[in-house]
């Protein structure tokens, strides 16, 4: 994986400075075809809304921005960059709409995109289960070796596609050390990393799943791993999960949803760079620097001598 950070401008520039070289600026339809090849729409969940949301197929595209969320700050970043295409992981309209009036925040996103000749393309659950996909990027960011999907896609005879990944650590870490590594290597958020379980337990195998992962607990149990790193974990599912695992060291690590999916932007940008180079396209691929985790601050509880709240 490339080095982490929020300054991930990439460059697929195709040597137009060289005398006599002919740069080919691809059309949107050609770039979309390449994206569809990486993340076919038919591999998305039936409830999902993936594909091209805004865009003129014949328009030339020379700059592309990858981001997790199609929100106004990201679109403003795309405008500033001069991007012709914004690729996001999350859909703009998941449940459909009857208005794109600029008085709504999503409508304003649509207006800003169209006024600035920027297309929007979404790769969501079709990127989650891809090979490589969102959880491969997460595992790569954490320096984990991917063994197999956590929930294999039955449509993949090779057993490489699917949701989440079961991974091995090169050297065992304690839960506390694994959490510290995740806090250090994922983009910084107000939340950081929360842990459920014994911080001193040893981790040799870990399941990871970018985005909300508490629907995967049954698969995590069946995988027999030492830890599970995901996002959006809630009180009751975690409480029940840890109670059931009372005699097992399996630990849960909860990161910010955005932070677990952001590494995919770097991965997707690198994949598109490679395609661009192969096709001889004059295309620059960038990764968004905007933090779109909605949580903006965190206050640690006050230290206490009360055993109920004492840190261990
Ligand atoms: Zn997500």
Image: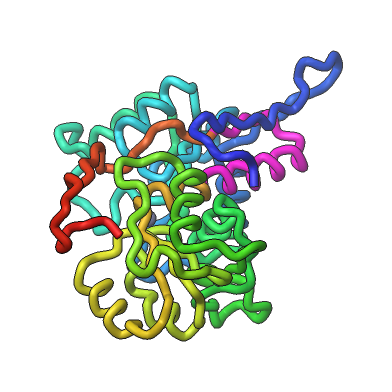
- Identify the residue shown where x is 77% and y is 42%: 278
Asked whether residue 284 is drawn in magenta, I would say: yes
Horizontal side, residue 282 vs residue 161: left or right: right
List the single residue furthest toward the front: 305
List the single residue furthest toward the right: 20
Relative height, residue 159 to residue 286 (above, below): below
Nearest to the observer: residue 55 or residue 69: 69
Nearest to the observer: residue 60 or residue 141: 141
Measured as percent of width and height from the top left, residue 272 is found at 63, 44
Q: Can residue 280 be seen in this view?
A: yes
- Quadrant in the picture for the C terminus: bottom left
Horizontal side, residue 300 vs residue 89: left or right: left
- Identify the residue shown where x is 17% and y is 45%: 302
Q: Quadrant of ligand 1?
A: bottom left
Horizontal side, residue 96 vs residue 51: left or right: left
Q: What stretch is highlighted in magenta?
A: 265-286
Magenta stretch: dominant secondary structure: helix
Horizontal side, residue 297 vs residue 270: left or right: left
Relative height, residue 51 to residue 12 (above, below): below
Query: How many marks do you count on the picture?
Result: 0
Relative height, residue 253 to residue 266 (above, below): below
Asked whether residue 39 is drawn in magenta, I would say: no
Query: What's the colour scheme?
Result: rainbow
Measured as percent of width and height from the top left, residue 163 is found at 49, 70
- Identify the residue shown where x is 83% and y is 21%: 21
Measured as percent of width and height from the top left, residue 104 is found at 17, 38
Measured as percent of width and height from the top left, residue 41 is found at 49, 61
């Amino acid at each position: 994986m490339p080095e982490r950070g929020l300054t991930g401008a990439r460059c697929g520039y195709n040597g137009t400075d060289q005398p006599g070289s002919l740069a080919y600026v691809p059309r949107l339809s050609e770039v979309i075809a390449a994206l569809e090849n990486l993340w076919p729409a038919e591999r998305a969940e039936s409830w999902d809304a993936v594909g091209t949301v805004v865009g003129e197929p014949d328009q030339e595209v020379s700059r592309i921005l990858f981001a997790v969320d199609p929100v106004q700050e990201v679109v403003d970043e795309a405008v500033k960059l001069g991007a012709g295409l914004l690729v996001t992981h999350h859909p703009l309209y998941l449940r459909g709409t009857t208005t794109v009036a600029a008085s709504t925040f999503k409508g304003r996103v649509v207006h800003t995109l169209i006024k600035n000749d920027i297309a929007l393309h979404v790769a969501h659950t079709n990127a989650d289960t891809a090979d490589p996909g969102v959880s491969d990027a997460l595992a790569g960011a954490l320096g984990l070796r991917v063994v197999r999907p956590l929930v294999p896609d039955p449509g993949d005879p090779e057993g490489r596609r699917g949701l989440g990944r079961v991974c091995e650590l090169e050297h065992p870490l304690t839960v506390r050390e694994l959490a510290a590594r995740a806090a250090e290597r994922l983009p910084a958020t107000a939340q950081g990393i929360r842990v459920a379980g014994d911080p001193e337990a040893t981790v040799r195998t870990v399941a990871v799943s970018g985005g909300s992962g508490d629907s995967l607990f049954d698969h995590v149990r069946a995988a027999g791993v030492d830890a599970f790193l995901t996002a959006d974990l809630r009180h009751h599912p975690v409480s029940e999960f840890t109670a059931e695992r009372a005699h097992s060291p399996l630990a849960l690590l909860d990161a910010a949803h955005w932070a677990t999916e952001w590494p995919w932007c770097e991965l997707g940008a690198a994949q598109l760079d490679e395609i661009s180079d192969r096709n001889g396209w004059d295309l620059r691929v960038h990764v968004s620097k905007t933090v779109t985790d909605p949580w903006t601050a965190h206050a640690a509880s006050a230290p206490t001598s009360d055993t109920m709240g004492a840190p261990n």
